[in-house]
Amino acid sequence: MKYVEGFVAAVPVANKDAYRKHAAEAAPLFKEFGATRVVECWGDDVPEGKVTDFRRAVNAEDGEVVVFSWVEYPSKEARDAANEKIMSDPRMKEMGGQMPFDGRRMIFGGFAPILDA
């Protein structure tokens, strides 16, 4: 069964083009490592909640937009193997040093789909 790794981050509005470029450069590497699909979404309608919300989850500041991304893999095992490659690949390390957002505030996690309609 497929496996999904999701990401949420706060990106300065001024860095939208840099983020798009960063994502476009990273996507082929994720696919090289075993991903079957990479999706990047720029926040367009991200409301503030009463208890919690996407903005609070990543401590988004004024002038930042929340991005939501996911990477699909054929299985959790494929994702785990990809993450090992990601952590050791010099191209990914170089990209990590040039992220157009504060990676410390990014949240991520792996998810096993229970419905794919």
Image (cartoon, rainbow, N blue to C red):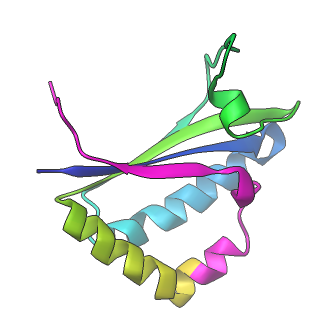
- Establish if 9 lies above or below 21: above
Viewer-proximal residue among 94 and 8? 8
Residue appearing at x 63%, y 29% in the figure: 54
Which residue in the rendered view is the most extreme toward the front? 51
Q: Is residue 14 visible?
A: yes
Q: Position of residue 21 (x, y in %)?
A: 61, 57
Which residue in the rendered view is the most extreme toward the top? 50
The C terminus lies in which quarter of the figure?
top left
Q: Position of residue 37 (x, y in %)?
A: 30, 52
Image side of residue 30 versus residue 64, left or right: left
Q: Position of residue 100 (x, y in %)?
A: 74, 57
Image side of residue 80 versus residue 45, left or right: left
Residue 6 colored in magenta in the image = no
Residue appearing at x 32%, y 67% in the figure: 31
Image side of residue 44 versus residue 63, left or right: left
Q: Is residue 33 visible?
A: no
- Establish if 15 lies above or below 89: above
- How many badges with numbers are in the image? 0
Image side of residue 82 versus residue 41, left or right: left
Viewer-proximal residue among 81 and 37? 81
Q: Which residues are magenta?
A: 93-117
Residue 29, by quadrant, is: bottom left
Viewer-proximal residue among 31 and 84? 84
Residue 80, by quadrant, is: bottom left
Residue appearing at x 29%, y 77% in the figure: 81
Residue appearing at x 55%, y 89% in the figure: 90
